[in-house]
Image (cartoon, coloured by chain):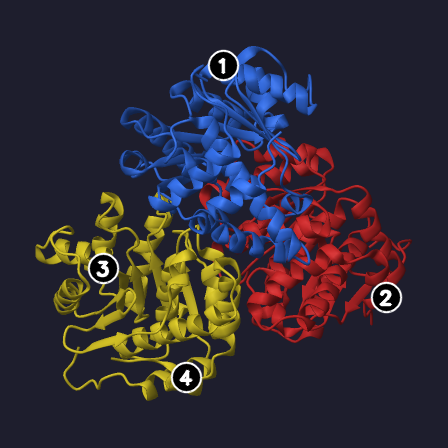
Chain colours: A blue, B red, C yellow
């Protein structure tokens, strides 16, 4: 967001993965019951250390020592929602970056309010969602409604507005991923349709963004590196897969096998 | 159940899968923590869109827009049990079909009462369970005890009584699946023993029934199509598997690859 | 622990697996949301019957009929923590052995207190953890701090003290697993580093210990048989794996394929 930050490149994206491998970050995850295992395995595969600490008695305590905190509102309950608020407040107070994945924001009222309240309480380093979710949050923040627009370009404008309003990075997932801090824009064209046939690939992307945010200060670079790593690995995985079951397995194998050099060489920035 | 409904055939079962692929249903799942990811991946593989909305603040709201609702009582908690009641009431009021999977009914008192209370509150389109679970529900509804009988034929009689009592379809899973609306009976002989070595295959079957119930009005046809799809895919998966781990992966691949024609040609109705 | 108990051998470890296969134990699991599916699949693969009954209304009722109870504090909530207390009290009253997996004990205050309170309430048959977790529990029980020591040998001394203090078996997982009842010591040198790149392998080990504790009275033999089975299967799985994704799949296949004879012949006791 700050003018002096340089545009993420294939080179700095590859270097970010190198940094993550050198000092594996501890990533606290407050996520949903559907993807908890998958998220942990994705983080382990890339080289990070996941810790699913999501109860109100421990979440704030852990956010102090975590390298980054992921908050995913996919299946919120009273207790985990309270833990999210506590973790975000503690992360903010202790300088731990946190990442928001506003699953189904716009479609359901409670979680939309919860996501917005978390953002208001402490600015996340990155907000990652699909076009509908980002549009919903932008509408809540700036007055646009979730149904007013739904093209990728329109979502990008909403993402820019959201990013500038809060001083954060916003990542819009899709066939081409659009990421922005309101000034800079990164588009990543890797990935394939099998990613939409496995639950939690988007959720895993949010978790990877938290892992990179723990080792790279620039939120846009962290979000870009995570997106590049997941989608480049997905391209490789699709080559050896028979369908969504074997693709999910291969995706973990490929994330673990991905080198900084291979990442830098395969990422398609546009 | 109504006399005018025709007997499900290999042809109508294949057509049901064609319908599901043409208009992918949104399936709201209130299920257990063990199988949440697996259930979502099974629904994605067959071509449906899963949404795990299982908290009391959002469950009723979502049941209005869902194509069908799955309620699985495998790991009930105070909050999710309340969400199940709310979702079922809302589904009933808005005409959304719902499917009950009464996991471990009969073995544990609280969930047995919960399952029966849900059925009493609003008739499910389909009830799916193993012989013990169906016998337990039939006993609660009609006076037979869970331990009184346990042969498949006896479970079928209990299933018929249960189906007639509530005006629903009852599916009894086993080496040969028995499905009935109290008048018609369908037996499906596909499937293999690896299905019992992977957790949640039965739970996934309940979810698939919800997906088919969203696109086919006849509950018996929907339940038959789901059973056929899962067991035919399981037959294919078993051929390429080394054990339960690779079988689960292959099952997702085969569900995604299954065509209406292949389904109609492979299902073994008796 | 009692002087008359003999040292576990490759032969008695193999026989333990034979016993488990002859009479598949029902294992009640109160575990975390990350590994619930994985744990159930691991138990099914070895030949046991998992049942995830973890709410306060049913946990005590089920502990009476279960062959063993696993308590894993990986993601505790108010409701599941209450269920753990109820299950342990009921298991103790009805003579059902229970196994404690004190995930992240020492790192987080609430769960450390919870784990110690459970141990104080009713002696577990086995406590399984990594070195830090065992040191933390030993410190709580006997005065040593978690940070005072962290070498494997020091953890073994703490494990011995913990085992003697409570009259239990303590298993310290690591590159070489160390198990002790305070008098006897077993070291198992199978396993490989891929086990640390998949979430819940340690949690699955705790569950397997519960399965073996249901069929073998000697806690040290049960813990040794579980450790041997998992690590020998892991050695086989690593041979056919491309990375952590395919390793997790192969591990389930190999657990299911493992024979008592192969286990006895492959285990490396030292």
Image quadrant holding the N terminus of chain C, namely bottom left
Mark 4 or 3, which is nearer the eye? 3
Q: Which residue is mark 1?
A: A164
Give the Cα separation between the discs numbered 2 and 1: 57 Å
Label 4 neighbour load within 10 Å: few <14, some 14-19, many 20+? some
Label 2 neighbourhood size at 10 Å, few (<14), some (14-19), many (20+)?
few
What's the distance in space between the residues labelled 3 and 2, CA to CA?
Answer: 56 Å
Q: Secondary structure at mark 2?
A: helix
Residue B150 versus residue A2 in the image, above or below: below
Query: In this view of the protein, which residue sits in the foreground, A114 or B176?
Result: A114
- Given the image, what chain letter belongs to the residue carrying mark 3? C
Could you tell me how far apart the alpha carbons at marks 4 and 3 are, in whole angstroms? 30 Å
Image quarter for residue C225?
bottom left
Q: What residue would you read off at disc 4?
A: C19
Mark 2 = which residue? B265
Q: Secondary structure at mark 1?
A: helix
Q: Earlier in the sequence, mark 4 or mark 3?
A: 4
Q: Position of residue B140 (x, y in %)?
A: 60, 59
Instruction: Tell me what residue is drawn at x 38 percent, y 59 percent.
Output: C196
Residue C131: assigned label: 3
Dot 3 alpha-carbon crowd within 10 angstroms: few under 14, some 14 to 19, many 20 or more? many
Q: How many marks?
A: 4
B98 versus C10 height, above or below: above
Inspect this view and state whether residue B216 appears: no
Of marks 4 and 2, the one in the foreground: 2
The nearer-to-camera label among 3 and 2 is 3
Q: Nearer the viewer, mark 2 or mark 1?
A: 1
Q: Quadrant of residue B148?
A: bottom right
Give the vertical position of A128 relative to B264 (above or below): above
Q: Position of residue A228 (x, y in %)?
A: 54, 38
């Amino acid at each position: 967001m700050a003018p002096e930050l340089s545009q993420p490149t294939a080179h700095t994206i590859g270097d970010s993965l190198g940094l993550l491998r050198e000092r594996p970050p501890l990533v606290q995850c407050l996520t949903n019951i559907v993807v908890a295992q998958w998220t942990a395995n994705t983080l382990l595969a890339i080289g990070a250390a996941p810790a699913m600490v999501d109860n109100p008695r421990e979440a704030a305590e852990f956010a102090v020592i975590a390298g980054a905190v992921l908050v995913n509102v996919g299946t919120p309950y009273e207790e985990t929602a309270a833990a999210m608020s506590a973790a975000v407040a503690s992360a903010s107070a202790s300088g731990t970056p946190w990442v928001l994945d506003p699953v189904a924001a716009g479609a359901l009222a409670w979680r939309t309010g919860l996501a917005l309240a978390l953002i208001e309480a402490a600015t996340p380093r990155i907000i990652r969602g699909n076009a509908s979710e980002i549009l919903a949050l932008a509408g809540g923040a700036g007055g646009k409604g979730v149904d007013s627009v739904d093209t990728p370009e329109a979502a990008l404008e909403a993402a820019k507005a959201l990013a500038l309003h809060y001083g954060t990075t916003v990542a819009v997932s899709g066939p081409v991923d659009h990421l922005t801090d309101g000034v800079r824009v990164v588009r990543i064209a890797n990935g394939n349709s099998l990613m939409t046939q496995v639950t939690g690939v988007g959720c895993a992307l949010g978790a990877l963004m938290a892992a990179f945010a723990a080792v790279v200060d620039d939120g846009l670079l962290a979000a870009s590196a995570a997106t590049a790593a997941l989608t480049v690995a997905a391209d490789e995985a699709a080559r050896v897969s028979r369908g969504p079951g074997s693709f999910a397995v291969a995706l973990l194998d490929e994330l673990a096998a991905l080198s900084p050099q291979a990442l830098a060489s395969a990422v398609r920035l546009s």
